[in-house]
Image (cartoon, coloured by chain):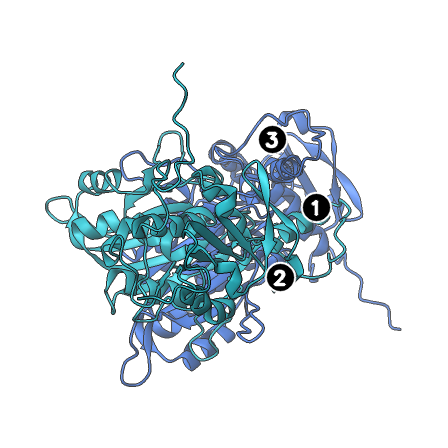
Chain colours: A blue, B cyan
Amino acid sequence: MPHEGRDSSARRNCVAVVGATGAVGRELLGILAARGVPREQVRAIASANSVGTSIKYGDGSVRVLGLDAASFAGCRLAVFAADAQTSRRSAPIAVAAGAVVIDNSSAFRLDPGVPLIVPEVNADALETGTKPPRGIVANPNCTTIILVTALEPLRRAFGIGAIDIATYQAVSGAGAAAIDELLDTTRRALGIESHRSDAHVSIFPEPCAFNVFSHDSAVNPATGVNGEEQKVIAETRKIWNTPTLRITPICVRVPVLRAHTEAITVTLSEPATEHDVRAALAAGKGLQLVDDRAANRFPTPRNADGRDDILVGRLRPDPGEMPDTQGRHRRWCLLACGDQLRKGAALNAVQIAEGLGVLPRLGVLPETQILHSPAPV
Amino acid sequence: MPHEGRDSSARRNCVAVVGATGAVGRELLGILAARGVPREQVRAIASANSVGTSIKYGDGSVRVLGLDAASFAGCRLAVFAADAQTSRRSAPIAVAAGAVVIDNSSAFRLDPGVPLIVPEVNADALETGTKPPRGIVANPNCTTIILVTALEPLRRAFGIGAIDIATYQAVSGAGAAAIDELLDTTRRALGIESHRSDAHVSIFPEPCAFNVFSHDSAVNPATGVNGEEQKVIAETRKIWNTPTLRITPICVRVPVLRAHTEAITVTLSEPATEHDVRAALAAGKGLQLVDDRAANRFPTPRNADGRDDILVGRLRPDPGEMPDTQGRHRRWCLLACGDQLRKGAALNAVQIAEGLGVLPRLGVLPETQILHSPAPV
């Protein structure tokens, strides 16, 4: 029996969002509001300097609470959208208070006792209505989520032998302040005055306006691999349970606000025709094929912005590989774009919660019946 | 004997720049001026609607001439920086007038009778003082130039078995109007009014402000490969004389003004240690190693902008490949950045001309002695 905290008598309807004032936190609140979770059941939790302020929730707002055990009272779900240190320290407190934790940080992702979930890929690693072993489920890194969602239909149909991936990552992955930095430095690059008092402070090691730079996560001095690349490798292997899969990532930031793009060359285990590869992708879950060669229209981060689905397209066999006698190829190139803050973070966490049964699926709130049926016209 | 044109009596000192008002044309004029070619020896040639206007040259300006045989009178060199159709039509006219043509378009690049040259790589395909067979030398595509310059030291030391490349291409490759479009649409995305009368006209199939999109060259409906990717494959194979080398490109535009970035995974023919790979790159021609893992400083297009050298860095062995017993790897990841308008176009053309002996090398003008020695202090 999990420890229920001080308020075990209260009905466990509440949802806590830790890091509610951050970019992912705000996105989470937006998704919860859109799904009809009532304001009274939301606990927006943030760091000390935000406590007591209000934050937008649906058409209204909620007060920001501090990060302590009392804030988790009555919560059956706590989504953490803060840094790894906060998750390591406070996720056990939320679990002790009776909540299931879905953690968006890297703190528990590689913990063998913590499931790492992308619902379209490995929902079967969770059991609806059953608490995960340690009370925690980890949400993968955004780049990983987009990659495995895009390739899952190919993995199921043909198997995957290797992945080469170069990323075009939006600044939003570095948080809300990074979005402000891109907008502000772009204004200044265009000769427009800055109104920010902290315009001299930079989140990134390089200017981000009209520039491209190697991902800002720390680079391992021995291997030369950066943190983002290491996450993509380790997390993809864990999610697919393929501990030796060859994944070669080159992670790069681009001056885009919130959706990530990935240029992928995937080597299939079994060769396939273009017809079969397209059919597999078209039937995939959580993605949409955007592939108009004549009009030169393919996935873009602008078009992925605000969408739940991953956009996949620019599909073609590697021109450097000869087809086999049946016209089949092993190596395929494609582009995938996904909203880093939605499917790459907040939405995936919400989908995990729905899969666990700790958050009612969209439009269905069995315990409290908050949503009204539309009035007959 | 080449046909000398109507002015065979004139001294052949002049340099014609066809497409002088375009982005590459202006860059060419800047490089010629910086190298001390006097204004009187420059023929700036452009399309009919620019004829008679003036264009900046060094501290002064030159008049724009029309594209006809008379404009090439007295020219020993004509650099074409226009579209392929213009080159196909007018390069033979310039050759007939006695000039050596260096063509920046794709018109002649794959012509077996036309050398395709990156001086750091295959200058030996030209002979100084000897006219090329058809009077024409082709300048490769910018993406190709950056790729082969960056990898040439590795090819010479270890051989190259395969290349995977994803590009982050500046809008400047689509011309001066594309630079205006990026600046203008970015202003509008920031809510600042546009002053362009043609603000509704777009060069690209997708918005370029805060966006990323598959390269705007036409996509082959059968293969799915776009024009830019096809150029990289075919031109790299021709320059290196490796007609079956496996090159897998994914070409993408990013909101950067003028320098291109390439994320490259190269498979060497012979495995090598990191020490040896670094030593080879450090001794390479036309490039500079930028690789500070502790400070997370690597090549960026901002830092490559305006530079002659290609910046190379973020070098590391593919983390998906186990080293051999001597700690050597075949697969290496790296980033390369190069100014698309300089080394990727104008500078490479000037270097070819210098190699041919039709343009004096920097600071040495044997025929006219324009440059004065610095006065003794």
Write down the chain letter for disc 1: B
Few, some or many residues within 10 Å of mark 1 (<14, 14–19, 20+): some
Residue appearing at x 55%, y 49% in the figure: A345
The residue to which callout 1 is attached is B187
Work out whether residue A49 or residue B85 is closer to the camera in this orientation and state it.
B85
Look at the picture and state if B224 lies above or below A220.
below
| Residues at circles 3 and 2 in contact by the CB criterion of under 8 Å | no
Q: Are marks 1 and 3 on the same chain?
A: no
- Secondary structure category for the residue under label 2: loop
How far apart marks 1 and 3 lie (CA) works out to 40 Å
Write down the chain letter for disc 2: B
- Secondary structure category for the residue under label 1: helix
Look at the picture and state if A91 lies above or below A135.
above
| Residues at circles 1 and 3 in contact by the CB criterion of under 8 Å | no
For the N terminus of chain B, the image quarter is bottom left
For the C terminus of chain B, the image quarter is top left
The residue to which callout 3 is attached is A67
How far apart marks 1 and 2 lie (CA) works out to 17 Å
Left or right position of A146 against B249: right
Q: Quadrant of residue A357?
A: bottom right
Q: Residue furthest left?
A: B325
Where does residue A249 sit, x and y in percent of width and height? Answer: 37, 51
The residue to which callout 2 is attached is B203
